[in-house]
Image (tube, coloured by chain):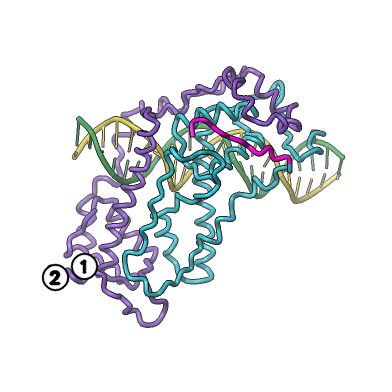
Chain colours: A purple, B cyan, C green, D yellow
Amino acid sequence: MDEEMSGFGLKPSRSGGGAKCGRWNPTNEQVKVLTDLFRSGLRTPSTDQIQKISSQLSFYGKIESKNVFYWFQNHKARERQKRRRVYVEYDQNDHNVAKQHFAEVTDTERVIETLQLFPVNSLAFSDQSEKARAITNDECKENTSPYATMYTCGTEMENHYPHRHPSLDLRLSFM
Amino acid sequence: MDEEMSGFGLKPSRSGGGAKCGRWNPTNEQVKVLTDLFRSGLRTPSTDQIQKISSQLSFYGKIESKNVFYWFQNHKARERQKRRRVYVEYDQNDHNVAKQHFAEVTDTERVIETLQLFPVNSLAFSDQSEKARAITNDECKENTSPYATMYTCGTEMENHYPHRHPSLDLRLSFM
DNA sequence: GCAAATTAATGATTTATTCAAG
DNA sequence: CTTGAATAAATCATTAATTTGC
């Protein structure tokens, strides 16, 4: 445990000398390793871990400890934010959405009420085919209700969890 | 070919009578509305929104809720794919490789803040919080900023829409 | 000009993640 | 640690564009 924890803090980092100055630009390999670590469960690496990760990743290119620190902080926050945004959506709709996206509420009945909202003019060149389609009642069975059974076949799916298990071991292997 | 094709370049669309029920084949109007919604910022409509959109679009032709759901999923994913492809091109010109990976993780969901075609105020997707960007010192504002140049890429589909352009007053009440 | 053959788009399914509740 | 909820990525599959030979 290096007492250099302060090293993570906002050092100018201009050290690069030549090339482009500025901020760290991770290589593909670095991002892959970091993402794997994240996926394996690592969220808030300790100082010790950060330095070891950074050391390993320096093999692939220029990197500093603080880059690793910030990467985890940002990645964690943004993943959470991404999820949070979805939840907010549902709250505002005040319906728990479930997966009834396919609820098939679309019946042409009530559509007629809303016709006025759309400019009828635009149908001038499509009335023959498109309008007919709307009026025609569907004879063909087309709804195989795909998703309804998606998760019901539980026995098979539950067994496969490729990346969830290695968890900590994977993490240590890099350090 | 269908002689109808001569007029406005509409797709043949043998959607009329017999119509084997294959997959959904959106009309130009439907695609235009969906694309406008997407460009205005909507990316993951809720069930409620999906149903209303579907209901509105059913005026232009046969459509189901799941079609709207799939359309947004696919369009979102493929726009992202396109963007990634541009990054790759940047890679070849400039060995700033890994930047796109970071962008990939960070993602740029919030794209458009303009285009107030309809009241999106109370909408779910209005959260834009990707501002906090400069944590560290940005001495060198070297900004390759590929983003700025590529927002013009909004799919070439909506371009060949006839000059009729019914001023889509979508006014979807849910929004 | 016209279809058969081929290629490009894109609709629909499946698979693998994520966070968080139990 | 396990599982529920909800995608987003990857993939499959079908339709439309187009190319090609006649």
Q: Quadrant of the C terminus of chain A?
A: bottom left
Query: Where is mark 2, residue-wise?
Result: A2
Identified by mark 2, the residue type is Asp
Q: Residues within 10 Å of mark 2 (few under 14, many from 20)?
A: few
- For the point 25% across and 68% down, the residue is A65
Q: Are marks 1 and 2 in contact (CB under 8 Å)?
A: yes
Asked if residue B166 is among those painted magenta in the image, a careful observer would answer yes
Residue toward you, A26 or A141 = A26
Identified by mark 1, the residue type is Gln
Q: Residues within 10 Å of mark 1 (few under 14, many from 20)?
A: many
Q: Position of residue A111 (x, y in %)?
A: 59, 22
Q: Position of residue A34 (x, y in %)?
A: 30, 59
Magenta residues (range): B164-175
How many badges with numbers are in the image?
A: 2
- Chain under numbered label 2: A
- Extreme residue toward the bottom, this view: A17
* SS at mark 2 in the image: loop
**Label number found at residue A51:** 1
Asked if residue B109 is among those painted magenta in the image, a careful observer would answer no
Quick check: A20 left or right of B1? Answer: left
When the figure is inspected, residue A165 is found, relative to residue A173, above or below; the finding is: above
Q: Position of residue C19 (x, y in %)?
A: 28, 44
**Label number found at residue B82:** none
When the figure is inspected, residue D15 is found, relative to residue A132, above or below; the finding is: below
